[in-house]
Amino acid sequence: MDLALTNSIYLFLIFIAVLITQAIAQPSFSGRYCDVGKNYTTNSTYQANLNHLLSTFPPNIYTADHTGFYNSTYGQNSDKVYAMGLCRGDVKPEACRSCLNYSTNSIKENCPNQKEAIEWYAECMLRYSNRSIFGVVETNPRYWFWNVNNVTSNVDDFNQVLNALLSDLKDKAAAGGSLLKHATGNETAPNFQTIYAQLQCTPDLSQTQCTRCLDVAMADIPRWCDGKQSAAIISPSCNLRFELYLFYEPSSPIADAPPPSPPSPSINNRTTTQGKKSNTSRTIIIVVVPTVVCVVLIISICACLRIKRKEGEEEISN
């Protein structure tokens, strides 16, 4: 009986450890788009081409010729699949590959039989389509996220500093080459606050195209995120984010991934749903893991006490 109880505890601990590992290993989800208007048939040639193409992304996203961006095609005619993957410019190769590896499975599970889909994470973006998506500016679908906290004083001065910072980084990101269009920077705002920002385009775009995409994203800030302490805007071709804390690695590109962002609700119904999923996943990790650890410790202590009590009873009876 004691041996069976001990084995059960060990199995339970292993099960909990696996759950915790899986939760921590998941990248920070930001948004998803599934084009329900274009479908493929299960076990079709298009599906086979899609599966093959997506499997090539994790090993090829970061090589001598690819620094966190990879695009490719596979198949012919109506069964041809176009796909691209983009990692955030400061993410390490290991985190980049891990994010894409996760997304290649997630996107097929969450957008089953869709010929076009996109998934965004804090660390990477993955998209595929049955049409050419290379060298084309696409600002929709677009998702907005912002912090619930507002700038409480000198709002006009804050916005002026923010706009100047974003404009400067926009020019730097757009001027990047065919391997990387990414820029980060910071500026001191009123009340000694420091604004940190990061802007990025898919590097298959030209300088003019990248500028145009980021202009659209920046125009959304006063419309949807005015007066907020932080915000993020993501689209198929570019993204931007600003915070009042350092959320990116300030050194050279492809560095350590930053800590998760604080909860940031989003704008419309679709975006709100996706945004809440991202924030919920982070909350689950923060709340559940310590709770599970406490439960495991309590169960282990109770089990040990029970075993010792039984051993004592056996000694007395003998």
Image (cartoon, rainbow, N blue to C red):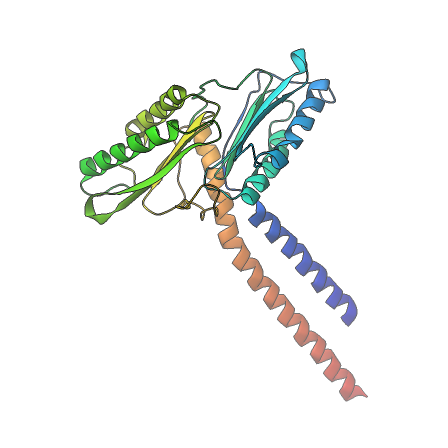
Report x, y in % for residue 184.
Answer: 37, 39
- Tell me residue 142's x, y (percent): 43, 25
Q: Residue at x 46, y 23 (%)?
A: 141
Residue 145 in sight here: no
Residue at 61% across, 52% down: 21
Q: Position of residue 121 (x, y in %)?
A: 50, 37
Query: Which quadrant, please, contains the N terminus?
Result: bottom right
Query: Quick one: quadrant of the C terminus?
Result: bottom right
Residue 154 found in image quarter: top left
Instruction: Name the residue located 60 percent from the left edge and 67 percent from the top edge.
Output: 297
242 relative position to 85: left or right: left
Q: Is residue 38 left or right of residue 198?
A: right
In this view, the residue farthest toward the top is 77
Where is residue 145 drawn, in percent x and y?
39, 35
Name the residue nearer the viewer: 303 or 221. 221
Q: Which residue is more in the foreground, 158 or 65?
A: 65
As drawn, the residue found furthest toward the front would be 64
